Image (cartoon, rainbow, N blue to C red):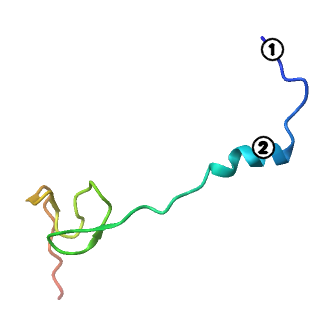
Amino acid sequence: MAQPKRRWSKARTGLRRSTWKVEKPSIATCPHCHEPVLPHRACTNCGYYNGKAVISVKEEENA
């Protein structure tokens, strides 16, 4: 199997990795309760997804 003749420089490695960026997640709003939520996920505030209640969310009692 072929082997490289010399190592890659740090500059060349940095150029190759320059596109490895962390992107901010896109945030949508829940159409039911208008809270920010990640797209294609059930809302953690109200439990709705695609207009239907898919998870039950416990109501907190303020005592």
The residue type indicated by label 2 comes to Thr
Residue at image point 14% right, 74% down: 59
- The N terminus, quarter of image: top right
Which disc is residue 55 wearing? none
Could you tell me how many numbered marks the image carries? Answer: 2
Task: Give the camera-side residue of 27 and 54.
Answer: 27
Residue 48 location, quadrant: bottom left
Residue 43 location, quadrant: bottom left
Badge 2: few (under 14), some or many (20 or more) residues near its Cα, within 10 Å? Answer: few
- The C terminus, quarter of image: bottom left
The residue type indicated by label 1 comes to Ala
Residue at image point 81% right, 43% down: 12
Whether 12 is drawn above or below 59: the answer is above
- The residue singled out by tag 2 in the image is 13
Task: Give the camera-side residue of 20 and 43.
Answer: 20
Q: Give SS at disc 1.
A: loop
Whether 32 is drawn above or below 22: the answer is below
Residue at image point 84% right, 46% down: 10
- Can you name the residue that lies furthest to the top here? 1
Q: CA distance from mark 2 to mark 1?
A: 20 Å
- The residue singled out by tag 1 in the image is 2
The mark nearer the N terminus, 2 or 1, is 1
Q: Can you give x and y, in whole percent of width and height, for residue 11 in the image?
A: 83, 48
Badge 1: few (under 14), some or many (20 or more) residues near its Cα, within 10 Å? Answer: few
Q: Can you give x and y, in whole percent of width and height, for residue 32 in the image?
A: 14, 70
- In the displayed structure, does residue 57 sit left or right of residue 28? left
Residue at image point 80% right, 14% down: 2
- In the displayed structure, does residue 51 sit left or right of residue 6? left
Q: Can you give x and y, in whole percent of width and height, for residue 22 in the image?
A: 56, 57
Q: Can you give x and y, in whole percent of width and height, for residue 50 in the image?
A: 14, 57
Q: Give SS at disc 2.
A: helix
